[in-house]
Amino acid sequence: QVQLMESGGGPVQAGGSLRLSCVISGLRVRRVCVAWVRQLPGKEREGVAALSTGGRDTYHSDSVKGRFTISQDNAKNTVYLEMNDLKPEDSATYYCAADTTMDYSYCTGGWALVGNQFEYWGQGILVTVSS
């Protein structure tokens, strides 16, 4: 059974930092496209970062580029989202998502975040940034 477990969210003041973690279990393939996707109530999901496990390339959306960094620790089956200089508009529920069918270029080129059609999703974790 595939599970994606997020942790590390919570309240933070504007300008502060948080690191989200996503522990992935149950996947037995070498390359998995893993992304962080956020959503505000009543709004569409917005993909903010993606990587392909085992690879070096990453993708960050324009809204978070330079402030957020996605990374991986393959030994721990964990993908991270380091969030710095947080703004109130970053407040959202953040989801970890994974897909075994997306190829490397599609994932790290940003296309995976256009439709956010991933096979597997975590339960989501809330990030609240106060001004």
Image (spheres, rainbow, N blue to C red):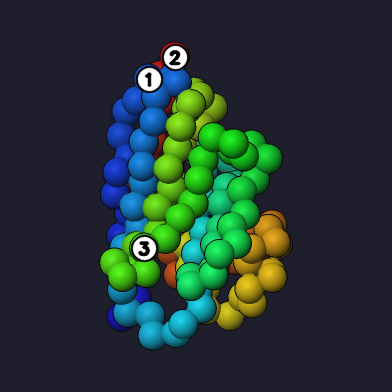
**The N terminus: image quadrant:** bottom left
Q: Are marks 1 and 2 in contact (CB under 8 Å)?
A: yes
Q: Amino acid at mark 2?
A: Ser
Closer to the camera, 5 or 69?
69
Q: Work out which quarter of the rendered image holds the C terminus and state it.
A: top left
Residue 73's label in the rendered image is 3
Give the residue at x 51% y 32%.
90
SS state under label 3: strand
Give percent across and percent down for residue 114.
Answer: 69, 57
Query: Residue 13: which numbered mark, if any?
Result: 1
Residue 18 position, x and y percent, is 36, 36
Marks 3, 1: nearer the viewer = 3
Q: In percent of the image, x 68 and y 40: which residue is there? A: 62
Graded by Cα atoms within 10 Å as few (under 14), some (14 to 19) or many (20 or more), the crowding at tag 1 reads: some
Q: Is residue 40 above or below residue 78?
A: above
Say whether marks 3 and 1 touch (CB < 8 Å): no
Q: Against 44, is 128 above or below?
A: above
- Reading the chain from its start, which is encountered first: label 3 or label 1? 1
Please say if 127 is above or below 129.
Answer: below
Q: For this view, does 57 lie left or right of residue 96?
A: right
Q: Does residue 130 lie above or below 93 as drawn? A: above
Spatial separation of the CA atoms under disc 2 and disc 3: 32 Å
**Sequence order check: which comes first, mark 2 or mark 3?**
3
